[in-house]
Image (tube, rainbow, N blue to C red):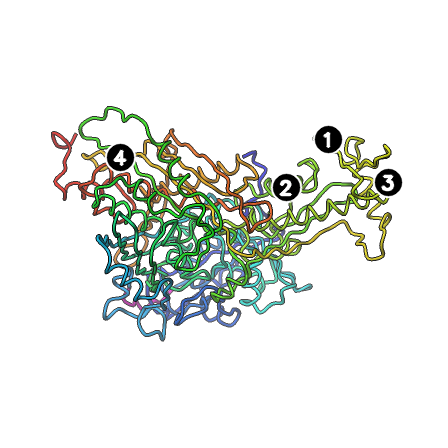
Amino acid sequence: MRGHGRFLADLRAAGVLYATLVRSPLAHARVVGFDASAARSDPRCALVLGPDDLAERTAPIPTAWRLPGQPEDRIPIAAHTARYAGQPLGIVVADTPTAAEDLAEAVRLDLDPLPPAATLADALAEHAPPIVPGAAGNEAGSIRFGSPEEDVAAAFARAELVVEREFTLPRVNHSPLEPRGVLAEYDPGTGLLTVHAGSQSPHSMRQDLCAVLGMRADRVRVIAPDIGGSFGSKVSLYPDEAMVCAAAVALGAAVRWVESRAENFNGAYQGRGQRTTARLAVGHEGRFLAFDAHILADLGAYATQAGSGPHQVTALTLQGPYHVDAAAATVTGVYTTRVPTGAYRGYGMQEAAFIRERLIEEAARELDVPAVELRLRNLIRPEELPHTTYTGLTYDSGDYGAALRRAAALAERPPPSDPPWVRRGTAVVAAVEITAFAPSALLETYGIAWSGWEGARLRINHDGTVTAYSGVIAVGQGIETSLAQIAAEGLGVPLDWVRVELGDTDTAPHSDLSAQASRALTLAGGALLIAARRLADRMRTLAAGFLGTDPDRVTQQIGSRADPSSPDAAFHGTDGARITWREVAHRGYRGWGNRKDTDRIRLEEAVDFDPPRLTFAHGAHAAEVTVDVGTGRVTVTGYWAVHDSGVLVNPLIAHGQIAGGIAQGLGQALSEEARADAEGVPVTRSFREYTVPAAQDVPEDLVIEHTCTPSTAIPGGFKGLGEGGTLLPPAAVTCAVAAAVPEIAHTLTSLPLTPSRVRAALRAAGITAEGGLR
């Protein structure tokens, strides 16, 4: 905000060269020729690497989360077949950015077009072209979670009402404030590759680069500067980023690449992309009997590192906060000739919430009972927690009914007088949020090739100041402030004594998953709190040695504005003697004051925290909308959210996280869709065609409240909240539109609710504005 940030595009290096990627204009084609002779003969050119060159210098990128039967477990870098429009086929390096772009255009691609399969229907058609070479068809494997099939069938056989719908959740662009980028520098003398990257997971990026380039782990260093947003788009190593690093190694120089906004739209991984057939069985007195779903996951041209993971999370969280007798979901991955999909904020849980809450709203409409009453009748009660769902998730603590009732109460207000062409409706929906992802044992059980533990290192320096190191990354979520607060509170010192260091694989504790999946504060914060408490005890013990008394007879008194050497920052004995915080630290570094030979000298604690289990946040959202039946325009006129994320470290940051998530979710509800034409070529290539929410799209009447049920699994009682705000807006808005115009409720199964889509549904139902178009 002050202009002091150092983002990837701000970084410079001596003698740096500039890279441009050569990308396929076609969605599916064999690369018959890659003629770079004109580019290589230009004196501005430093290097060109085509598919054959890349095959000699790189190995494919390993994947981590795969489907049973998945035919391809690695991501190709050297591509001899283009599988999506925008796929990088080569890289050009030159002395200026303009020269690199000019020379990339001089490369002549000879492409032999192959039939595209841009949609799930195209890819699954009987004579669809195979997208993965050597694979039989375009299915990428399948997995089922939940109750045995006979239990699901029995539950549906008992049902008095079955609601079944097919839902289409489109692809979306991450639209970060700053697109991706890499500054890679290779020193041939030391063999060290230093990579500055807009990465959400530097340690994972380093591991993948070691595999791709065949380098030792201690010869690759990844540093994440300030990151202008990610939302999951900067979690994984991309082939184009690997190409930049390979070029730096080949040249023994610094090579820089910053993604353009057009490249971000065309070549960066997208989120969501799913078609699901789902059912809800309802029994006597509106009791839910079973949820069942069959999910077709659009993986794109290849499965990314996360691959089908988001869609598997949709299956795992389908049951939500409700009681049922059975629940199951099947996920089938499908390859298409579009850019691959991957992690996106809400990671499958938003899709599950939309599917589940729309089914419940439709059931309430068909039963002619208030939807809030139907939900309350079926919610898991606090005294029933912990509760294990049929897909194996154990909810730990919370009061789902209290959140739903409060959100409903907040939304109650007298409706204004609307003109006759405007319909108004309100809906209240609920969800649980997986946080503290994930215990390493759970990842091992599911065969997900990541570690889930989180490390923290806390050091009291010789001058009494404090430095905290963590493997999580700041992506705009204020994690530096929150971690500093945890360390300061655990040590009992002022906040401004603490400095937090993040983002450098040479100094940060190992973290595979880093800042994603609502885990940064819960796991890094939990580890840091343990370290702070241990270090506080050690300081008290040292102070007791200097004061000649027992630790339990020492009190620590530090003023909120004191510095470490101030008399107002001291340990006090019972006889009036005192010693300042700084003096204890300084003497401790000399090795003085230790009572036992086994006592550590260094005032530093390292903690590796592997959570015993997941912890679950939860929330309820209410939305009020108006629908202009003449134009089909949906306007959100009020929004009320109640969240329980356990103990809040910083309420202001928590509010901002939820508010930002709501705005992002409203965009997906009303306007955002990454589209391609029948040939698979993107048609949303800029913010002119892809509409993200603006200030006027977020209602002035936006209310966010928090309740607190501490986690029983995380030190400090923390639960995550980074994704919670974005889970429910699409469900809340769509259910509110259904309440406003029940005549079209059964058709509201696809997002976004653009004016043209809503207007078509209104016209199909025979609803027009009074007097025709206004």
Gap in angstroms between the C-alphas marked 4 and 3: 69 Å
Q: Answer with left or right where residue 368 lies relative to residue 340.
A: left
What kind of residue is marked 1?
Gly
Q: Tell which of 335 and 408 is nearer to you.
A: 408
Residue range in magenta is 109-116
Mark 4 or mark 3: whose residue is earlier in sequence: 4
Mark sitting earlier along the chain (1/3): 3
| Place of residue 722 in the rendered image (x, y in percent of width and height, measured from the top left) | 48, 45
Nearer the observer: mark 2 or 3; the answer is 3
Judged by depth in the image, the label closer to the viewer, 1 or 2, is 1
Q: Residue 459 placed where, x, y %?
A: 72, 48
Q: Earlier in the sequence, mark 1 or mark 2?
A: 2
Q: Earlier in the sequence, mark 2 or mark 4?
A: 4
Give the amino acid at mark 3. Leu
Q: Position of residue 423 (x, y in %)?
A: 22, 33
**Badge 1 is on which residue?**
559
Answer whether labels 1 and 3 touch (C-beta < 8 Å). no
Question: Which residue position holds label 3?
Answer: 547
Residue located at (62% from left, 39% from top): 485
Residue ID for mark 2: 484
Residue 91 in the image, given as x and y percentages of width and height: 47, 61
For the residues labelled 1 and 2, say whether their Cβ atoms are less than 8 Å apart: no
Mark carried by residue 425: 4
Q: Is residue 97 visible?
A: no
Distance from Cα at disc 1 to Cα at disc 2: 17 Å
Task: Please tell me whether residue 468 is drawn above or below residue 243 in the rendered image.
Answer: above
CA–CA distance in space, label 1 to label 3: 20 Å
Image quarter where the C terminus lies is top left
